[in-house]
Amino acid sequence: MLIETLPIVTSQLPLMEAFYTLQGEGQHSGKAAYFIRLGGCEVGCHWCDVKESWDADIHPKTSIENIVQGALQYAGRLAVITGGEPLMYNLDELTGSLHQAGFQTNIETSGVYPFSGNWDWVCFSPKKFKTPHPDIYEHANELKSIIYNKSDFEFAEQHAALVNEKCTLLLQPEWSKHEQMLPLIIDYIKDNPKWKMSLQTHKYMNIP
């Protein structure tokens, strides 16, 4: 049974880190981007590579104004909001301020909380550990399914059947098993060409 949890409305957000780099994965891979990583996550992926983001209380509450000012220090005008799980918070004010400052807004989310924010691109990456909120499917521009074992192909197809028809479908190997899973993903995409490959290119290039 899905229990709806309302997002937290705040003009301050727990900021784990913010940094300027290249987007390493998904449809916008290779673009210069300012990443805003918010603290707080209840999804609990055992293979998560930023488990330090899970506890929101250990990360400083930062005003939206200061977050945007940090982004403005760099030439790029693509802001990627990630976590943790960013939709824990109501992101209307953050996205509005970023747009006003001239940024394109992208989000990376597991979609387990009600949708908020005004986004130019929504990367929806569902996880087995917590059921997505139903409203994410109509907003998703990109379904990024992480392949950790063979059963994840079926999981990916279950969510592909629910997203809107314009949503880009991506399969991405979980990094610790990419050598094992990559050949399986290649074969799967050849047999199911509606899917595309997503790689964590930033890890291959050893950049943040």
Image: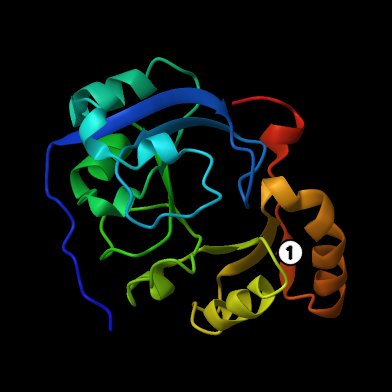
Q: Residue at x 23, y 21 (%)?
A: 66
Which percent across, then down, holds residue 91? 24, 48
Instruction: Residue type at mark 1: give it.
Output: Lys
Which percent across, then down, holds residue 69? 29, 20
Q: Is residue 85 above or below residue 32?
A: below
Residue at the front extreme? 46
Q: How many marks?
A: 1
Residue 48 or residue 164, whichever sits in front: 48
Label 1 Cα crowd, 10 Å radius (few <14 / some 14-19 / many 20+)? some
Q: Residue at x 61, y 66 (%)?
A: 168
Describe residue 201's horizontal placement relative to residue 101 as left or right. Answer: right
Q: How is the image coloured?
A: rainbow
Quadrant position of residue 54: top left
Residue 70 or residue 149, whichever sits in front: 149
The residue to which callout 1 is attached is 196
Q: SS class of the residue under badge 1?
A: strand
